[in-house]
Amino acid sequence: MAKKKIAKAKSKVKVKPKAKPKAAKAKVKAAPKKVAAKKKTAKAASRPVAKVVASALPKVSSKPWGKDGKALDGVRVLDFTHVQSGPTCTQLLAWFGADVIKVERPGSGDITRGQLQDIPGVDSLYFTMLNHNKRSITLDSKSKEGMTVLERLVKTCDVLVENFAPGALDRMGLTWERIHSWNPRMIVASVKGFGPGPYEDCKVYENVAQCAGGAASTTGFLDGPPLVTGAQIGDSGTGLHLALGIVAALYQRKRTGRGQRVLASMQDGVLNLCRVKLRDQQRLAHGPLKEYTQYGQGIPFGEATPRAGNDSGGGQPGVILKCKGWETDPNAYIYFITQAPVWEKICDLIGEPGWKTHPDFAKPPARLPRLKQIFERIEQWTMTKTKFEVMNECNALDIPVGPILSMKELAEEQSLRETGTIVEVDHPTRGKYLSVGNPIKLSDSISEVERSPLLGEHTDEILTKVLKFSPREVAAIKASGATGQAPKAQAAE
Ligand code: CAO
């Protein structure tokens, strides 16, 4: 963790401009080498035999790491997503090497292009930060010609990802049966607000999912209302879940040859992330949750998992404590965990060596009713140091602590620039901006962050190079208005 703030840190990560159209990627993978069955000689039979599994894997690549293509090379995605949940998923697939073709409504496109705009007439950061490494085609899916193009896209792609309101894809005419009849290998992946049940027809946004998935009822302080969290666990969290489902379906398709439907509901995704709270719900049946602060305060538990303030979900007492400068800096705080194995080191660090053997403090159960007193004493110590000083001193002793980092500090954090987690991207109409790069690092499939496409920027190249429509057919499609008025790719640069 950087101790100093570095004002204008430059990313070392190469950010490629999306200058040239991508060539259609070969979908044919290297055929597995046939292993000729050899007769065992008497000598060979006498040796211990490493079991050779007849696998479909090609021979081990001898190319340097990161130089043998990308994990999802050859996978083409029909990206019918909008807002945040779906685009998070397809952006990840694109970073792993999939060719992602985003289908957008002519004229307006993904609604986020115009939402929370900081620069008039320029694609918003909301859009640019969720749609890297994709190509954009504008298409009115409700027109006859638009559907002709969609049919060919379905036949050409491996995965269709969508997060329309329930039933919208069917109303468009793209039922599972129809898609499957056009392309039985197609994986159709959807984000919906709820899974099958009483709420399945509801439209759902981030905070609705946080509330319906159990996050809000368990977030906040005991004496306050439920709270939503800044982490977009409903949208981006569900996009992550969906991406994993898609990759698993692609893997299964290698064996079965057929596609399948993948559903990630936002309620399910949030609940999955709140797993420990359902754990606590069941523990309540067997007595109070002793690691919760309210236990030490003598406050009785109700029927449901309560809001636990800043208590740690892992059962080790933890709180957020003030550090030097807290009076003026809203983020001069640190998360401090009194983890049992390092208790003695904590006692020495804060100047209370007597607590190591004192019967009121030496063992975790004795400490539980005294946590308020303990943390007040630790805070007296943390308030004499900056959060980074606390971090350094505690980490040297394996005491887990977490500095409360602001978005400003994260944006300026040099180590995050160096790993490509924070990247600077250049955009033809916006100029340079910061984004979060691929948070998942593969050693043999290195992500390069390419800027998001302008609306309909790749309409022509997709119609001609990917879908192989003839010039006459392209002219007819365009004349019908199905693709709207798309800007030329060159004009974008
Ligand atoms: N051409 C023509 N029509 C198009 C089109 C295109 N290229 N792309 C979309 N449309 C149409 C859809 O077919 C739909 O038409 P109908 O209502 O007539 O069937 C219409 O646009 C609106 O789609 P929508 O209902 O998905 O969009 P919305 O803004 O009304 O709702 C949202 C947005 C997010 C609430 C809803 O899509 C939803 O619940 N999605 C599932 C859950 C989800 O992902 N939520 C997270 C959103 S991020 O916070």
Image (tube, rainbow, N blue to C red):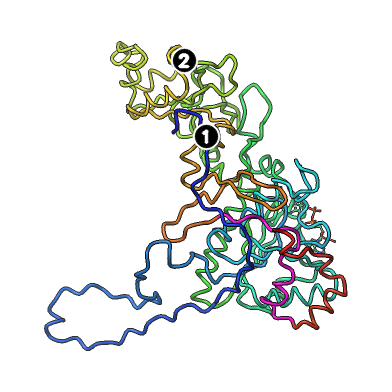
Residue 226 locus on image (x, y percent): 67, 30
Q: 81 or 309: which is nearer to us?
A: 81
Of helix, strand and loop, which mostly describes the magenta segment? loop
Tell me the quadrant of the picture where the N terminus can be found. top left
Residue 396 locus on image (x, y percent): 33, 28
Q: Residues within 10 Å of mark 1 (few under 14, many from 20)?
A: few
Residue assigned mark 1: 285
- Residue at 46% across, 60% down: 445
Question: Mark 2 near mark 1, Cβ–Cβ under 8 Å?
Answer: no
Q: Which residues are magenta?
A: 449-469
Left or right: residue 166 compared with residue 16: right
Looking at the image, residue 316 lies above or below residue 82 = above
Amino acid marked by disc 2: Glu
Q: Residues within 10 Å of mark 2 (few under 14, many from 20)?
A: many
Q: Nearer the viewer, mark 2 or mark 1?
A: 2
Residue assigned mark 2: 379
Residue 28 locus on image (x, y percent): 52, 79
- Residue 366, image quadrant: top left
- Marks 2 and 1 sit apart, C-alpha to C-alpha, by 34 Å
Q: 214 or 266: which is nearer to us?
A: 266
Looking at the image, residue 302 lies above or below residue 138 = above
Q: Secondary structure at mark 1?
A: helix
Q: 33 or 416: which is nearer to us?
A: 416
| Residue 265 badge | none
Looking at the image, residue 104 lies above or below residue 45 = above
Q: Secondary structure at mark 2?
A: helix
Tally of marks: 2
- Residue 362, image quadrant: top left
Residue 97 locus on image (x, y percent): 54, 64
Magenta region includes residue 454: yes
Amino acid marked by disc 1: Ala
Q: Is mark 2 within 8 Å of ligand 1?
A: no
